[in-house]
Image (spheres, rainbow, N blue to C red):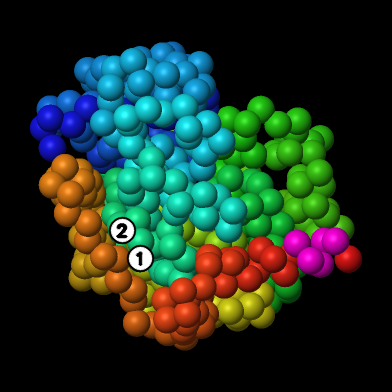
Amino acid sequence: MEKSRICIYINNYGTTNMVMPSLIEANPGMGGTQYEMFLLCELFSKNNIPFTLLLTHKQQFSYEIKYEFVDNIESAFDYCNRNKSKYIILRANDGLKSIDKLKETKIIYWVHNFIDYKSATLIAKNSKVKKVVFVSQEAADFYYDHDISKKGAVIFNAIPSKRVINDKAKKENIVAFIGDLSPYKMFDKLTAIWPKIIKKNPDAKLLVLGSGDLYGKGKKFGAYRLAEEKFEVKFLKPILKNNLFGTVEFAGLVKGDMSQKISRAKVTVFMNPIETFCIAATDSIGNGVPVVCPKSTGYCDVVNKKTGFLFRSKFGAKRYINKILKNKDSLVINEESLGYFKSFQPDTFYDSWISLLNDLENDNHKKITHKKNYFVNNKLFVVIMRNIRLILHLPNCFSRIGIKWYIAKILKKN
């Protein structure tokens, strides 16, 4: 692996206004994907792993790191060609349309967000994509019946090593939300049920830790300067209609340690059913606050019976939130209940990446396996479809994401 010439490409538009600190102990307030990619760069740099960081914008660092400035992904590919780089690590889908511009360099795609059928099929078929890294086992299992899984590997996301479980913190009837105020994170689904939560818990407060521009997309904000205009109107409608604005605290983007803010809460809620990992959930749990989230995808790897509740519908979400607010649950988060967090530590994360790169150097391709929780995420169907495809030599369109894509295409035509 020492002989590898590795590049890591990051579009760092949203982080240019900060001096990049060490990320091992805490996230200074950046989006999860950028946090993971910059953390990997820091760990490589501190362990003297030869690599080049390719950034789209100038960036200051609090530690020594080598980086080159590139205009875009095409420029990054040009750099790789000129320097005969062996691998380039990219966020999944980056450069997919320009992939043929690469000469000898192989791509390692890092799947931080779910990718659609067409993209997954292109990645599976293109020989320039050497590996596809999934950030949780459930994220990998989502594609188990598609050929992209043949290139798959699982490396759990890392979480900050510093945790503050404040057992003496005075808990208030606070429901927290952590994340980007965007349609993807479905904050509007939480505000839609908030009036009913308040009806059962008149003293409850909603604490919103996040920004409508967390990922630096430069959107046009609404009248309250909270999020993109149309989405702001949507999530505020039930709040304003029921005169509940005073029950919501929009705390904005929390820079650095959020333990003082989050430790006051009794529960943190997530509504988006499509998460590859959900770092924000581990932030909450790591600070001693249980979570309520959908029983789907990456949540099933980061939340268990000791650290939260997994719901199947909005009715389940309301029931679990009310249960926690009324102190009817028995969840007590401590170091013992966080034993599984060892899989998410920066050291484990770093070792997994080094192991993967060594395997690539030695042409050692390990087959990906799946969790045998067949009644989660429709996994039984996925495993059955994988076996049918293998036996009958069927194309990728007979995978779950392929079937859904073609059904959506037919419905759109009609």
Q: Residue furthest front?
A: 393
The local secondary structure at tag 1 comes to: helix
Amino acid type of disc 2? Answer: Val
Disc assigned to residue 137: 1
Whether label 2 touches label 1, CB < 8 Å: yes
Magenta residue check for 75: no
Tell me where residue 185 sits by quadrant. bottom right
Query: Residue 341's spot in the image, x, y percent?
Result: 26, 61
Magenta residue check for 411: yes
Q: Residue at x 13, y 47 (%)?
A: 362
Q: Nearer the viewer, residue 328 or 141?
A: 141
The C terminus, quarter of image: bottom right
Label 2 Cα neighbours within 10 Å, binned few <14 / some 14-19 / many ≥20: many
Horizontally, is 46 left or right of 277 in the view?
A: left
Horizontally, is 150 left or right of 408 in the view?
A: left
Q: Residue at x 28, y 37 (%)?
A: 40
Query: Residue 254's spot in the image, x, y percent?
Result: 48, 38
Q: Whole-Å distance between the Cαs marked 2 and 1?
A: 6 Å
First in sequence: mark 2 or mark 1? 1
Query: Residue 247's spot in the image, x, y percent?
Result: 69, 56
Q: Nearer the viewer, residue 272 or 125?
A: 125
The local secondary structure at tag 2 comes to: strand
Tell me which segment is drawn in magenta.
Answer: 409-413
Q: Residue at x 65, y 69 (%)?
A: 404
Q: Which residue is mark 2?
A: 154
Amino acid type of disc 1? Answer: Gln
